[in-house]
Image (cartoon, rainbow, N blue to C red):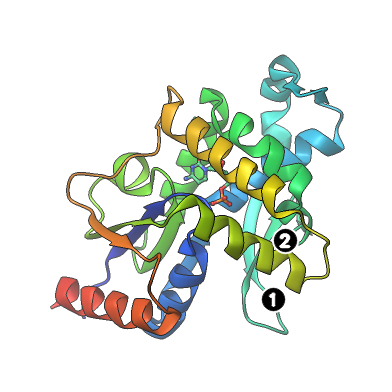
Amino acid sequence: MKKIIIAIDGFSSCGKSTMAKSLARNIGYLYFDSGAMYRAVALYCLRNNLIEGDKIDTVKLREQMDNIKITFEADPATKNSVTLLNGVNVEHEIRSLEVSRMVSQVAALDFVRSEMVEQQRNMGKQKGIVMDGRDIGTTVFPDAELKIFVTASAEVRAQRRYDELKARGDNPDYNEILENVQLRDHIDQTREVSPLKKADDALLLDNSNMTREEQEQWLKEQFIAHTR
Ligand code: DC
């Protein structure tokens, strides 16, 4: 069967990563979480005092871009893909609210995006990958054979994020999360470089009222249709 590139884009917290991961596992493809890469850059900024108040020191960050290496590897215990920042597993830290608050600003910087896009294209050289993000079908892989654009209401997405944080032992505030989701939507859709938008040839999936199983089934059908 021919190997393809599957690009899954969409709004934050709409279950893209869960879908993409399980699709990759089911079809034997590699999974790449491009959002995790921007999160790792934001974590780097936080750890290296490149953020003052709410502002990123873009001069210093640009100078230090060469010091930031992001890779993925399979966790030996769970087999899930985890994110490494300069060789250290930061999968847990990049999901904190602190990182979530800063990441859209980091992802709006052109020099950060061009570096990440280059790394992402290298990851897709052999095909046989599922990558999720915001600009995968529009900018990173405009020729991807299967493109999906996922959406759900802001309230549904905030609730999902709340449940996720609660499940890992945090003490989240629903309204704070909803505000963060809405703010990130706004920044992602209005930024100058690669704003979040559906590629013309992407399939639209609104999963507000779909179960995980229904989504998995739908994705599998699309995969089969695009590899025949
Ligand atoms: O998918 P996520 O919430 O982990 O993404 C984190 C941030 O990175 C979010 O603000 C959108 C941004 N992002 C991006 O600009 N381009 C991508 N390809 C992936 C994520």
Residue 23 rendering spot, x and y as whole percentages = 40, 76
- Residue 38 visible (yes or no): no
**Dot 2: what SS?**
loop
Image mark count: 2
The foreground one among 116 and 20 is 20
* Residue beneath disc 2: 91
Q: Give the quarter of the figure containing the N terminus.
A: bottom left
Question: Does 64 sit above or below residue 221?
Answer: above
Type of amino acid at the residue the image marks with label 2: Glu
Query: Which residue lies under the disc numbered 1?
Result: 75
Q: Residue at x 58, y 64 (%)?
A: 160
Of all residues, the one furthest to the top in this rendering is 59
User: Considering the numbered disc 1 on the image, is that residue within a helix, a strand or a loop?
Assistant: loop
Image quadrant for the C terminus? bottom left
Q: Which amino acid does label 1 sit on?
A: Asp
The percent position of residue 117, horizontal first and vertical second, equals 46, 40
16 lies left or right of 126: right
| Residue 205 horizontal/vertical position (percent) | 30, 62
- Residue occupying the point 17% across, 50% down: 201
